């Protein structure tokens, strides 16, 4: 039997997984058309809607990790030649540009400096000028630790019939994500961040407006595996076999959603905010500064400058090997310059905050 | 906690999962760049090579189910306008046609009646005449229970520089699959059939010839998620982050491969053949006939006519609800006419054979 160390995962995800979720994962596998599994799928859809704060009928878990969710949204909603505007201020905004271009989209990237959030008024101005078929932005940019305000974008996008795509991979279940109130037409997330479930599924939700776009596609969706015109007939009442769902991962997601809903969304958001404040106070008392814009910190992903005099890789290695704690390296423009400390879902506890602070202090002492 | 019944899975997959594999699945999640996980990935690659009987460097587990493996192979090896010849004698051959067309391939489908295997000489003739950029065929057609001989195809395909794609979703680890000896350039499988691991990953292997084709692509791979030019840099020594791998599913696959290799491939193939013979004798003694061609039965997937006088759905429901045994319905041309009895991996035991025979007898008695 493989030997796995017990890490404390305080990086950009995967996050710490509750025992209950691991136990659900290990329940016996049943068939993908077993009536018991079909009930689990229905239950998943209902609970995903609650977490996404939406009534969207087309809400389900795509059989791949968060990036598969991103691809699902673009490959289904964009047709070759369609225009897309993508806001880019980090790795995941950049990934959306790449994905949209591979779908044949004519992509206009709007950029902001790494570590900053976009000014919504400026975005709205650009949207009104270009009228892209879809406008896409990352809600919580995992590479920079920035939370992007997005509550006023939909109006501008919907005014001319466009669709609003929101990447909620890191934001969902850690900060408020209000799909219906914000007018989001397509949202996707990952299981391994604030839902505290192992990676392997991507919750996706499409508004009726997005479904209409899907229904009037001229051509087939380029990806067979991610084709929602077929996948929805498996998750819907038709129960048409499409592909064999990752059965056990779906058990785990249901258990993870139950834990989220038992705590309640408001309490969960409050806990993430409080743990972030506690971590921030501790880091600042050590003179460690955030690389993300003040006032726009993503509570569950703290991107901070590597402590002065500490070697990036050696510091992280010390934390991992000596203390069994994983924190994340910088990505892209922040490579070698930033550490990413995640306080996601089950991992956002006072104990973990104190622990990571103590060990960063130790790493700095040993420099 | 969700309540899952203990089914005996004797359908087309997922198959029965050993407790060891479920226990591995529930080990604590660690990071996708943790040195321990990187060692697991290396170990997976080595063991997948053994099971595929190949030395192919580019052998890995794609982060999706078997159909994602199919799409991975086509989307990476076909470019828009490339010609593809696909042999179709069941649902999964048909699925390859659909997938190849979505990749922009100019597809020629070669058909054979459902339940029959192709004559290799006939295929070779067609390959020589059309010289398709890729030739693809299903090794074990899960919808018809036919095992397709494929040992002489590669020579014809390679003669003019084509690539040979083999779908091994249901065949791998149940019957001999000899990627190198047969000259297969791209093979994919699923974890939930004869490997007896839950669904969620797709083992994929590409020959150096296929890798060369990948390297000289003119355009980017249409799918970001399945783009092997990037995925291989995560599985290779570069360790470039691409997407967050389904960590726990990879633990489970490694444990499942260990179990396969502890038994040994020859012993495993022999067990599948013996259990198939035992089931067949029992079914025939009840007057139940196979819908697949005599001499071409796929041992791990027995497609037989629904017993005379028994209602298809009611019979399967009886087995599931009263005895907790899942068998598969007919698909496509066999819908309502055939049952598919899987004896895959961990599930291919004398106990299960006797059990399913007894209960089919009971279903026939109650008709």
Image (cartoon, coloured by chain):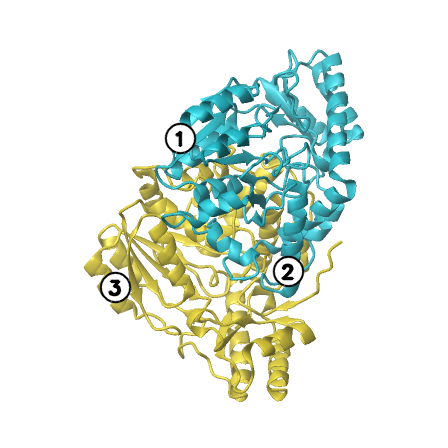
Chain colours: A yellow, B cyan
Which residue is at 37% across, 45% downward?
Answer: A76
Q: What numbered label is drawn on residue A196?
A: none
Which is more N-terminal, label 1 or label 2?
Answer: 2
Q: Nearer the viewer, mark 2 or mark 3?
A: 2
| Depicted B364 relative to depicted A304: above or below | above
Spatial CA span between label 2 and label 3 = 43 Å
| Depicted B75 relative to depicted A184: above or below | above
Chain that bears disc 2 = B
Assign the C terminus of chain B to one quadrant of the image. top right
Residue matched to label 3: A124
Front in this rendered view, residue A42 or A322 = A322
Chain that bears disc 3 = A
Occupied quadrant, residue A321: bottom right
Instruction: Give SS at disc 2.
Output: helix
Q: Is residue A75 left or right of residue A169?
A: left
Q: Nearer the viewer, mark 2 or mark 1?
A: 1
Spatial CA span between label 3 and label 1 = 45 Å
Residue matched to label 2: B37
Residue matched to label 1: B107
Whether tag 3 and tag 1 are in contact, CB under 8 A, the answer is no
Spatial CA span between label 2 and label 1 = 40 Å
Front in this rendered view, residue A260 or A336 = A336
Marks 2 and 3 belong to one chain? no
Occupied quadrant, residue B29: bottom right
Is residue B118 in sight in this rendering? no
| Depicted A139 relative to depicted A229: above or below | below
Whether tag 2 and tag 3 are in contact, CB under 8 A, the answer is no
**Residue B2, image x and y in percent?**
65, 47
Marks 2 and 1 belong to one chain? yes
Occupied quadrant, residue B347: top right
Label 3 crowd (10 A; few <14 / some 14-19 / many >=20): some
């Amino acid at each position: 039997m493989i030997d796995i160390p017990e890490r404390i995962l305080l990086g950009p995800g995967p996050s710490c997984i509750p025992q209950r979720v691991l136990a659900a994962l290990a329940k016996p596998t049943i068939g993908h058309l077993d009536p018991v599994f079909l009930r689990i799928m229905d239950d998943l859809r209902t609970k995903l809607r609650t977490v996404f704060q939406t009534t969207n009928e087309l809400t389900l878990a795509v059989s791949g990790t968060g990036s598969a969710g991103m691809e699902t949204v673009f490959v289904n909603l964009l047709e070759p030649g369609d225009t897309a505007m993508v806001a880019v201020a980090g790795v995941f905004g950049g990934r959306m540009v790449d994905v949209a271009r591979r779908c044949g989209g004519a992509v206009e990237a709007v950029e902001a400096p790494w570590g900053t959030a976009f000014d919504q008024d400026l975005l709205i101005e650009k949207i009104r000028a270009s009228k892209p078929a879809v406008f896409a932005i990352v809600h919580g940019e995992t590479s920079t630790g920035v939370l992007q305000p997005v509550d006023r974008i939909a109006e501008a996008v919907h005014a001319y019939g466009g669709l609003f795509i929101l990447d909620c991979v890191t934001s969902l279940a850690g900060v408020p994500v209000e799909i219906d109130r914000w007018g989001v037409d397509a949202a996707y997330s990952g299981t391994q961040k604030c839902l505290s479930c192992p990676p392997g599924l991507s919750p996706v939700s499409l508004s009726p407006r997005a479904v209409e776009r899907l229904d009037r596609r001229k051509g087939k969706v380029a990806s067979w595996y991610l084709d929602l015109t077929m996948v929805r007939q498996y998750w819907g009442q038709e129960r048409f076999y499409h592909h064999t769902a990752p059965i056990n991962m779906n058990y785990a997601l249901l258990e993870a959603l139950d834990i989220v809903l038992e705590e309640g969304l408001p309490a969960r958001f409050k806990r993430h905010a409080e743990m972030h404040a506690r971590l921030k106070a501790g880091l600042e008392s050590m003179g460690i500064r955030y690389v993300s814009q003040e006032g726009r910190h993503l509570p569950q992903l703290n991107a901070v400058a590597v402590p002065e005099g500490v070697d990036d890789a050696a510091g992280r290695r010390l934390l991992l090997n000596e203390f069994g704690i994983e924190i994340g390296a910088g990505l892209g423009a922040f490579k070698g310059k930033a550490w990413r400390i995640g306080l996601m879902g089950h991992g956002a506890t006072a104990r973990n905050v104190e622990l990571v602070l103590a060990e960063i202090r130790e790493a700095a002492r040993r420099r």
